Amino acid sequence: MKASLPFIEESFDKFNRTIFEDKLPKIPVALSNASSYVGLCTFKTRRRAFRAPEHYDFKLRISTRFDLPESELEDTVIHEMIHYYIRLHGIKDTSAHGNVFRQMMDEINTRHGRHITISHRTTKEQREALIDKRPKWHVVAVVTFKDGKQGLKLLPRITQRITAYHRALMRSGKIAGIEYYFESDPWFNRFPTSSAFNVFFPPMDEVRAHISGANPISVTSRGIEYGNKE
């Protein structure tokens, strides 16, 4: 199921009563379309002289991008309620998911039969569902290393960045060659675009299948030239 305001608000009230002994004041709940998180507890911090910082203006945000079993969505709400409890009561922890958080999480899982985790683990199907399926033009680089290994890189459609990337990799002494293509297949939307000097290593048979009809690009240290694949 996908998150809805009534479900999240009812879950908050239920678990506040059954798990947190009604020690959590009700907070605003907002739905988002984020793909970077399932749930998020946000707040502001007020610094105070000679006193511990005060946290306030709490909000609970739940993404509607994920289609989850009801129990996993409930566990997400409880996960964020643990964050809320710790911050609201000014409890010091070793990190965001430190010793205090883990102790509370383990106790709730044991006493209430929950399956809360530190982070939400999405399935392959859920990750695929989040990928933007709209065609977008990409500059796709297939990098072949001297040891025969091949990697993939998506570059910005900016000539200076493409040529700078080309020069840097070819001067590294580790690269046997780089193929460049201009491709709009939505399959490539799953990879970030940047000019950082790195590559990804997806299965190359998948990569080749998605550039089979792509237009090749000729890149030198001075510029690029778009061609037409016959």
Image (cartoon, rainbow, N blue to C red):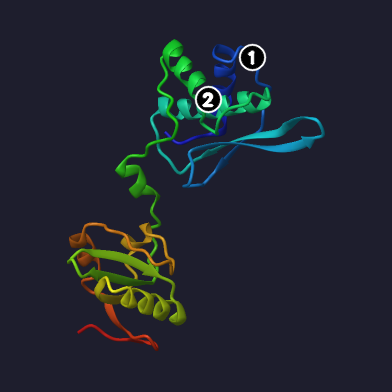
* Residue 26 seen in the current view: no
Which quadrant of the view contains residue 124? top left
The residue at the point 72 percent across, 37 percent down is 45
Name, please, the residue furthest toward the front. Answer: 173
The amino acid at mark 1 is: Asp
Sequence order check, earlier mark of 1 and 2:
1
Reply above or below: 39 against 14.
below
Residue 152, position as x, y percentages in the image: 30, 65
Along the viewing direction, whichever of 84 and 38 lies nearer the viewer: 84
From mark 1 to mark 2, how far is it between C-alphas?
Answer: 18 Å
The residue at the point 56 percent across, 24 percent down is 82
Crowdedness near tag 1: few (<14), some (14–19) or many (≥20) residues, C-alpha within 10 Å: few
Quadrant of the image containing the N terminus: top left
| Residue 35 falls left or right of residue 202 | right
The amino acid at mark 2 is: Phe
Residue at mark 2: 101
Along the viewing direction, whichever of 81 and 185 lies nearer the viewer: 81
Quadrant of the image containing the C terminus: bottom left
* Residue 96 seen in the current view: yes
Residue 198, position as x, y percentages in the image: 36, 64
Residue at mark 1: 22
Tag nearer the camera, 1 or 2: 2
The residue at the point 33 percent across, 77 percent down is 171
**Tag 2, which secondary structure?**
helix
Name, please, the residue furthest toward the right. Answer: 49
**Tag 1, which secondary structure?**
loop
Residue 167, position as x, y percentages in the image: 37, 79
| Residue 105 falls left or right of residue 47 | left
Residue 214, position as x, y percentages in the image: 26, 75
Along the viewing direction, whichever of 157 and 4 lies nearer the viewer: 157
